Amino acid sequence: MMNRPVSLLSLLLLVCAVPAPAPRAGAALPEPPAGPVEHTVELVTPDDVRLEGVLLVPAQTAERPRPPAGWPVAILVHGHAKNRDGLLPLADALAARGIAVAVLDQRGHGGSRSTARTRSIYAFPVVPESHIRREVGDQLLLAESLAERDDLDFNRVALVGIGLGGLVAAEASWKLPHVRALVMVDPAVPVAGLDPRRDLALFGERPVLFACSGFPQPQARARALAEYGHGERTVRTYEIYDALEQLVAEGRPSLADIVDWLAGKLTDDR
C-alpha cells in the first residue's frame, strides 16, 4: 500500500484530537467562587401573621475569613406594593463584601400573606396607618431573631429602606442601639405617625446616606432631612427616573455607591 502524503489540515486535526493530560494525582483543582449561604426566614408576629424572608450569610474563604465576632448585618426594607425580589441585587452585592443581609417580605406582600394558624390569606388593612406602624415592629422582631445567631455581629448593624420602607427603617433604626448607619432611598413624606425628622433627630450622630433618583421631590426632602441629627449626613442624587428599585438594580452606579458606603461603616473593606 502506498503511503499518501499527510496534509497540513490533517496534522492540525490530529494535534487537536490529542487529549489533554490528566491532572496529577493529588493535584488540587481550582475551587469555584463561593457565593453566600441562603437561609429561609420565617417569623410569626404577635398578631398572628407569618412573615417570610431570606438571610444571606457570606461564605467564609481563605481570602475573607469570618470575623471573630461574626459577620456585620444589613437589614433591607422594601417599598410598598413591592416585595423582597427588588432588593436581591443589593443583598448579593453586600454579601460579596462580607456583610450578612436579611430582608423580609412585608406583611401583605410577597410570601408574607398568610396567618400563622390557618394559613389563610392576609391582606394589609384598608387603613394604612396601623399597618405601617406594625411594620416597624416586624423589623424589630427580625432584628431580635438575628441577634440570637452566633455567626452575626449585632454590634455592627445597618438598615436600608426604600420609599415608605425608608420610614419604617428610620424609626426601627433609632430603637436599635447597635445600628451604626442608615440608608434612605428616595425618602417618602411623613405618613401614619412615622416622621423621619423626629426619627433622624433621635438617631443622633450616627451616619445617614440619602440616595435619590432624578425626581426633584425626594431630592428636596433628602436635603431637608439632612439637617436633622448631628452626625454625618450624605445626600447623593442620580439621573434615574424609573421605579425606585432601579437605584439598587444590578450595574447601577447608585448600587455600587450604597455598597461602598455601607462597607465603610460596617467593615474594614473600603
Image: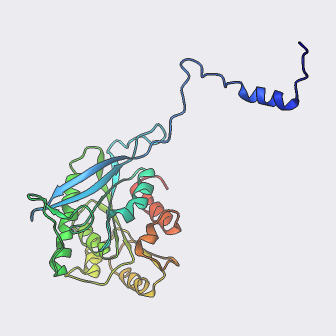
Q: Residue at x 31, y 52 (%)?
A: 55
Give the vertical position of 31 relative to 241 (above or below). above
- Please count the marks in the image: 0
Residue extending farthest to the top is: 1
Residue extending farthest to the front is: 1
Q: Residue at x 16, y 62 (%)?
A: 114
Q: Is residue 233 visible?
A: no
Q: Is residue 260 visible?
A: yes
Residue 174 versus residue 152: which sits nearer the camera? 152
Residue 112 versus residue 76: which sits nearer the camera? 112
Give the vertical position of 29 relative to 143 (above or below). above
Q: Classify residue 197 by image quadrant.
A: bottom left
Residue 150 percent location from the top left of the image: 25, 43
Relative side of 100 to 111, left or right: right
Q: Residue at x 53, y 78 (%)?
A: 239
| Scheme of image coloration | rainbow
Q: Classify residue 127 by image quadrant.
A: bottom left
Residue 120 versus residue 240: which sits nearer the camera? 120
Residue 144 percent location from the top left of the image: 19, 56
Quarter of the image where the N terminus is located: top right
Residue 46 percent location from the top left of the image: 9, 62
Give the vertical position of 10 relative to 172 (above or below). above
Residue 47 percent location from the top left of the image: 9, 65
